[in-house]
């Protein structure tokens, strides 16, 4: 028999202040398949896709899941969540990377 191993990215935690939590669109256990049309199979691909969105001029981010669901959030909502996280944790550095 042949064994095939495919990597998947599983959500293990969603920050309480995240717009995805507020809108109830991302849950622990979700399998991420794409970010703004970029395929995602592992954490490195997710981080690259997120960074491209951060550096781009598209206002919304779309995360797709194996189940077929999608989660959409605006740049403003993501930035507001980051501000809350930094204020609550006294972190000064940007937390946008992997901000789900």
Image: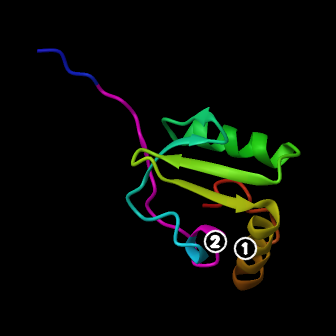
User: With 48 as the anchor, is 43 left or right in this view?
Assistant: left
Q: Residue at x 70, y 80 (%)?
A: 89
- Residue 8 among those drawn in magenta: yes
Q: Quadrant of the N terminus?
A: top left
Q: Residue at x 39, y 49 (%)?
A: 67
Location of residue 28 with respect to 42 vertically, above or below? below
- Residue 30 among those drawn in magenta: no
The kind of secondary structure the magenta stretch mainly shows is: loop
Q: Residue 18 occupies which quadrant of the picture? A: bottom right
Q: CA distance from mark 2 to mark 1?
A: 5 Å
**Magenta segment boundaries in residue numbering:** 5-20
Q: Indicate the position of residue 11 as horizontal and vertical percent values.
A: 46, 56
Along the viewing direction, whichever of 11 and 44 lies nearer the viewer: 11
Do tag 2 and tag 1 residues touch (Cβ < 8 Å)?
Answer: yes
Q: Indicate the position of residue 98 as horizontal and vertical percent values.
A: 64, 55
Q: Indicate the position of residue 42 as horizontal and vertical percent values.
A: 50, 38
The secondary element bearing badge 1 is classed as helix
User: Farthest bottom residue?
Assistant: 88
User: Farthest top residue?
Assistant: 1
The disc placed on residue 81 is 1
User: With 6 as the anchor, is 53 left or right in this view?
Assistant: right
């Amino acid at each position: 028999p042949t064994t095939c191993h495919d990597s998947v990215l599983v959500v293990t935690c969603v920050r309480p202040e995240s717009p995805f939590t507020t809108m109830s669109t991302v849950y622990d256990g979700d399998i991420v398949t794409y970010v703004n049309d970029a395929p995602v199979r592992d954490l490195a691909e997710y981080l690259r896709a997120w960074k491209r969105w951060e550096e781009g001029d598209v206002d919304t981010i779309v995360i797709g899941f194996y189940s077929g669901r999608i989660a959409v959030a605006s740049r403003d909502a993501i930035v507001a969540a980051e501000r809350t996280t930094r204020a609550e944790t006294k972190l000064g550095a940007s937390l946008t990377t992997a901000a789900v």
